[in-house]
């Protein structure tokens, strides 16, 4: 499967993965982040049931707070 992940092409050795599986495989360890699949916001509770397929565009953005 070939996708665009955070504006970069990435290849996985499977036809589809959930967003959480991609987060695990890519070793993202952010405390808080936002996920968007093909421009649509995906809530945290939906990441286990939302599948990413070949050609999809996935953004996993680290949410930084400051003050």
Image (cartoon, grey):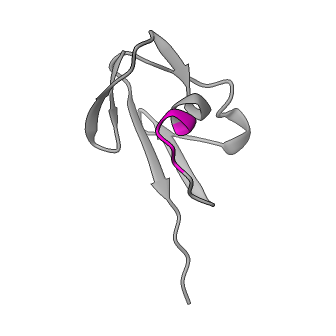
In the image as oriented, which residue stretches furthest toward the top? 15
User: At x 61% / y 60%, what residue is drawn?
Assistant: 32
Q: Which of 18 and 42 is in front in this view?
A: 18
Total of numbered circles in the picture?
0
- Residue 2 figure quarter: top left
Residue 23 picture quarter? top right
The answer to whether 56 appears left or right of 41 in the picture is: left
| Residue lying at 61% horizontally and 34% vertically, measured from the top left | 20
- Tell me: residue 14, above or below residue 56: above
Nearer-the-camera pick, 14 or 32: 14
- Residue 18 lies, in percent from the top left, at 58, 24
Placement of the N terminus among the 4 image quadrants: top left
**What percent of the width, then of the height, locates residue 12?**
39, 20
Does residue 17 belong to the magenta stretch? no
Whether residue 61 is situated above or below residue 43 in the rendered picture: below
**Image coordinates for residue 37, horizontal then vertical, percent:** 47, 34
Name the one closer to the observer, 39 or 54: 54
Quadrant assignment, res 9: top left
Q: Quadrant of the C terminus?
A: bottom right
The relative height of residue 59 versus residue 33 in the rendered view (above or below) is: above
Residue occupying the point 68% across, 29% down = 48
Is 26 contained in the magenta span? yes
Image spot of residue 55 (x, y percent): 32, 19
Instruction: Give the residues in magenta.
Output: 23-28
Residue at figure coordinates x 51%, y 33% from the top left: 25
Residue farthest to the bottom, as pictured: 67
Tell me: residue 59, above or below residue 15.
below
């Amino acid at each position: 499967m070939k996708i665009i992940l955070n504006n970069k092409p990435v290849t996985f050795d499977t036809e589809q993965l959930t967003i959480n599986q991609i987060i695990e495989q890519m070793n993202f360890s952010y405390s808080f982040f936002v996920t968007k699949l093909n421009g649509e916001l995906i809530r945290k509770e939906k990441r286990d049931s939302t599948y990413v397929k070949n050609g999809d565009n996935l953004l996993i953005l680290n949410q930084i707070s400051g003050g």
